[in-house]
């Protein structure tokens, strides 16, 4: 009997598009249905590269968008792998992404949904869950928590993102110094060259946004648009600081309008 084939030889992106089903929205007064980028009833987001980077200020809905896409791919809002529920949902878990997922649809070619949803704030709960699941199964635990905080994160990224699948990263830089962000940047570049994985990431980090050949999208009050990373508000803010650190900080402390805040 021939072995069942797994995986695909087609390159990423596997998730080609998400689009809005406006008839399913009962009202747009409450979050997340009042987000500016949902104002267009024909909202559609096309993925054009192996790595898509979404940036924007807090409150614009970038993490909600990541949660929505992850939910459409079968992942829990708290993060982890498919079928995992490592965090107690009886406590405060934001379900905005789940609510938005009910009014969205996804288009795949092919439908590759194996992967991982990484959230920095739930990493330790997920890591403990993986250790316990491995022990229950009689195998050695991955033991990401025995290393330093940063090394555990990076080993996790290295091991998980090397497999074929789709991966969601929500602000991974919150766990990494700028130097360590460069390690993640190199890993993402390797993933692109292997052509086996799709990554969709929300970030504030200009270092990560600078990944060559990545699709960069910025969320603002005007909506969601493709942009060169040099034109993002985050990049311009750091650029203004580096050009004149003293003057920049003086303006920030004085709360003067620089056009960047």
Image: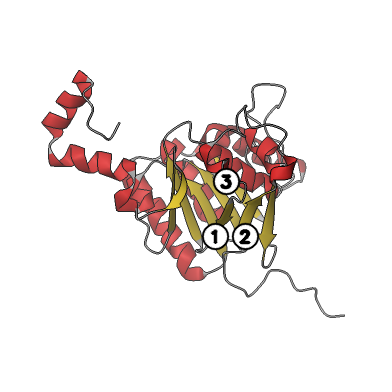
> What residue is disc 1 on?
47
Among the two numbered marks 2 and 1 on one chain, the one whose residue lies closer to the N terminus: 2
Q: Nearer the viewer, mark 3 or mark 1?
A: 3
Real-space CA distance between mark 2 and mark 1, rounded to the nearest whole angstrom: 7 Å
- For the residue pair 163 and 243, the one nearer the viewer reads as 243
Circles 2 and 1, Cβ within 8 Å, touching? The answer is yes
Horizontal side, residue 231 vs residue 16: left or right:
left
Label 3: which secondary element: loop
Give the number of the disc on residue 15. 2
Label 2: which secondary element: strand
- For the residue pair 230 and 137, the one nearer the viewer reads as 230
Image point (56%, 54%), residue name: 45
Q: How many marks?
A: 3
Percent across and percent down for residue 27 are 68, 31
Among the two numbered marks 3 and 1 on one chain, the one whose residue lies closer to the N terminus: 3
Circles 3 and 1, Cβ within 8 Å, touching? The answer is no
């Amino acid at each position: 009997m021939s072995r069942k084939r797994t995986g695909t030889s087609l390159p990423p992106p596997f998730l080609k598009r998400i689009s809005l089903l406006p008839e399913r929205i009962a009202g747009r007064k409450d979050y997340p249905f009042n987000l500016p980028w949902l104002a267009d009833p024909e909202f559609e987001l096309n993925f054009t590269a192996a790595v898509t980077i979404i940036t924007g200020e807090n409150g614009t809905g970038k993490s909600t968008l990541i949660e929505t896409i992850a939910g459409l791919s079968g992942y829990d809002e708290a993060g982890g792998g498919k079928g995992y529920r490592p965090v107690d949902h009886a406590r405060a878990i934001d379900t905005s992404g789940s609510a938005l997922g009910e009014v969205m649809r996804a288009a795949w070619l092919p439908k590759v949904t194996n992967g991982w949803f990484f959230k920095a704030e739930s990493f330790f709960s997920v890591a403990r869950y993986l250790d316990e699941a491995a022990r229950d199964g009689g195998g050695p635990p991955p033991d990401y928590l025995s290393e330093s905080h940063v090394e555990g994160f990076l080993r996790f990224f290295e091991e998980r993102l090397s497999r074929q699948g789709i991966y969601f990263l929500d602000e991974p830089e919150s766990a990494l110094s700028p130097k360590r962000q460069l390690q993640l940047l190199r890993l993402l570049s390797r993933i692109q060259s292997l052509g086996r994985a799709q990554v969709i990431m929300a970030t504030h980090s200009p270092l990560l946004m600078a990944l060559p050949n990545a699709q960069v999208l910025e969320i603002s009050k005007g909506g969601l648009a493709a942009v060169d990373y040099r034109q993002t508000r985050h990049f311009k803010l750091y650029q203004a600081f580096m050009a004149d650190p003293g003057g920049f900080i003086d303006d920030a402390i004085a709360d003067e309008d620089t056009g960047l805040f």
